[in-house]
Image: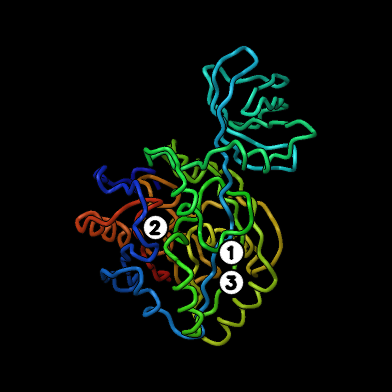
Amino acid sequence: MRTSDFDFVLPEALIAQFPTNERSGSRLLKLDSKTGELSDHMFRELPAFLQAGDLLIFNDTRVIKARLTGQKSTGGAIEVLIERVIDDHRALAHIRASRSPKPGSKVLLAGDIEAEVTERQDDLFMLRFPDNTKILDFLEQYGALPLPPYITHTADNADEERYQTVYAKSLGAVAAPTAGLHFDTAMLEQLKNNGIRIAFVTLHVGAGTFQPVRVDEISEHKMHSELYSIPEETVALIKATQANGGKVTAIGTTALRALESAARTGELIAGVGETDIFITPGYQFQVVERLLTNFHLPKSTLMMLVSAFAGIENIRHAYAHAIAQQYRFFSYGDAMLLDRLD
């Protein structure tokens, strides 16, 4: 298939620049993938579409303050976006500069911290921080929240709250698992009171989630690798839910990708791993029956994923409807509830 198969024209005014006043105050477009039927709702109506005994899988990653500014040893200005923290003193990063730094060179960051560029890995650079500087502590003090490139304002205190899920726990993402941003503590309690179970996985979302597909044939696209973790408890809950006739819903494409990555052998296996899974139409899903997700960028890998899950024509029709009805798009936008098309 071609990248152009997943393109659409989006009016710029529909790109949400700010979240709704309340997390659950967004809209929800429900798609029945079997019939193609669409229905318009508010997100707070979500519990009505779930049954006691169903299971929701959330990604509990927490966004780090991954954006930094600084300069090369030659004095040239640079922008740094940490992609992945490897350990206390090493991190892979995107570096934007007039000329890419060479291995062995130094960069001066906020707080007069000097980091060494030790190697280059494709379009990423390995940075080594001083022994007396723990990267996560440094980022918390000097870094900025890395809002997506289509959000035009600089991150402020409101973003530091709203660009995190209320259940975010495991530090390591550079982008939020945005389907989870719609949930507040009151809705989570309501779901539990309705007999709906909740479980967690972790996938540390990388900046590659915003990377455009630059090849014509989607089979030629290479995904960035991301770290994921699936607890034993989550695997047990999924198996018990399905054995009892309940449905499993992934809250966001990142939760879905983590689960599918852990089920590549045909059986869902708990543990920690790395994934560069690229889900496109024709993929056979192993784990979940439903997907809650936001609206995605044209020609993106996530457009390809939801098209694989719910059907290409269904997604085209749903996006045309969402644009006509002026739904809000992308990270701070509205949500979709999709049934899997088998």
* Residue 63 visible: yes
Q: Can you give x and y, in whole percent of width and height, for residue 167 in the image?
A: 55, 63
Kindly identify the amino acid type of the residue bearing the numbered disc 3. Ala
- The residue that disc 2 covers is 294
Q: Can you identify the residue that label 1 sits on? A: 259
Q: For numbered disc 1, what is the local secondary structure?
A: helix
Residue depicted at 52% across the width and 77% down the height: 55
Against 72, is 49 above or below?
below
The residue nearer to you, when weighing 36 against 342, is 36
Q: Residues within 10 Å of mark 1 (few under 14, many from 20)?
A: many
Residues packed near mark 3 inside 10 Å, few (<14), some (14 to 19) or many (20 plus):
some
Q: Quadrant of residue 99?
A: top right
Tell us which disc is closer to us: 1 or 3: 3
Q: Position of residue 326 (x, y in %)?
A: 22, 55
Cβ atoms at labels 3 and 2 below 8 Å apart:
no
As measured in the structure, the alpha-carbon distance from the residue carrying label 1 to the one carrying label 2 is 18 Å
The dot on residue 199 is 3
Q: Secondary structure at mark 3?
A: strand
Classify residue 257 as left or right of residue 149: right
Is residue 38 shown to the viewer in this render?
no
Which residue is the extreme one toward the right?
A: 131
Q: Give the alpha-carbon distance from disc 3 to disc 2, as whole Å.
A: 20 Å
Q: Choose between 178 and 121: the one closer to the eye.
A: 178
Q: Nearer the viewer, residue 285 or 246?
A: 246
User: Residue 225's spot in the image, x, y percent?
Assistant: 61, 46
Residue kind at label 1, given as amino acid type: Leu
Disc nearer the start of the sequence (1/2): 1
Badge 3 or badge 2: first in the primary sequence: 3
Q: Amino acid at mark 2?
A: Asn
Q: Position of residue 205 (x, y in %)?
A: 56, 50
